[in-house]
Amino acid sequence: MEIREYRSGDFKACVELFVRVFNGEPCRDQWTQERASQYLDEAVHRRGFLGYVAVEDASARHGAQAAPQGLIFGHKVVWWNGDQFMIQMMCVETGTQRRGVGSALLKHLKRQLDLKGFMQINLLTRFQEWPASFYRKAGFLESEDLRFFYYFYKARSRVTLQGR
């Protein structure tokens, strides 16, 4: 497995990966290709964007463009005590999960951000134990002093958040 910086030629495969992973278990989101394309397009064109993809070793594919098996995208946040990085999305192909791909992506990102002088990495994740334990194992701490708030326009949504 090779971890490399995201390239614009990866876009379509990253959208497809994102839709497969987040529409599958356990997330059960309802992403369309169009909405996912818009979401990833906003991410990759955001100021301070940095992204990495995990692909099969290129030598094993005889030079063919390998489809990403995982991705981690985010952006720089300027803060009073130094630059922080906000992980906006991370996903690994369902059949490749629990084989070290996500850990390798996160380790690579942490190393690159350290070399660039970042002070901190932040992220939000679902309120389930499996993602929390993954990030804890990677050395992340859970905030005790922040809360996440949202305002939901029920009449505009095609889905509800009940049961999540």
Image (cartoon, rainbow, N blue to C red):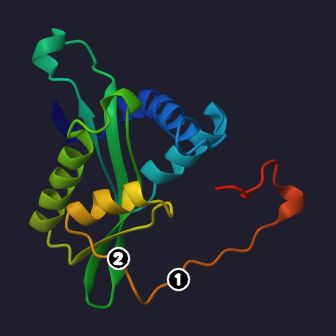
Q: Quadrant of residue 60?
A: top left
What residue is shown at x 43% (from left), y 90% (from top)? Answer: 145
When the figure is inspected, residue 130 is found, relative to residue 32, above or below; the finding is below
Kindly identify the amino acid type of the residue bearing the numbered disc 2: Glu
Q: Quadrant of residue 87?
A: bottom left
Kindly identify the amino acid type of the residue bearing the numbered disc 1: Arg
When the figure is inspected, residue 75 is found, relative to residue 84, above or below; the finding is above
Q: With 164 as the anchor, is 4 left or right in this view?
A: left
Near mark 2 (Cα within 10 A), the count class, few <14, some 14-19 or many ≥20, is few
Identify the disc placed on residue 83. Answer: none
* Residue 98 in sight: yes
User: What separation in Å lies between label 2 and label 1 (alpha carbons)?
Assistant: 11 Å
**Front residue of this view, candidates 64 and 162:** 162
In the rendering, at what x and y percent does residue 95 appear? 36, 27
When the figure is inspected, residue 91 is found, relative to residue 49, above or below; the finding is above
What residue is shown at x 66% (from left), y 34% (from top)? Answer: 32
**Front residue of this view, candidates 159 and 134:** 134
Residue highlighted by disc 1? 147
Q: Identify the secondary structure beneath mark 2.
A: loop
Q: With 87 as the anchor, is 154 left or right in this view?
A: right
Near mark 1 (Cα within 10 A), the count class, few <14, some 14-19 or many ≥20, is few
In the rendering, at what x and y percent does residue 5 appear? 24, 42
Marks 2 and 1, the one that precedes in the sequence:
2
When the figure is inspected, residue 56 is found, relative to residue 73, above or below; the finding is above
What residue is shown at x 26% (from left), y 70% (from top)? Answer: 140
* Residue 48 in sight: no
Residue highlighted by disc 2? 142
Q: Identify the secondary structure beneath mark 1.
A: loop
Mark 2 vs 1: CB contact within 8 A: no
In the rendering, at what x and y percent does residue 164 appear? 64, 56
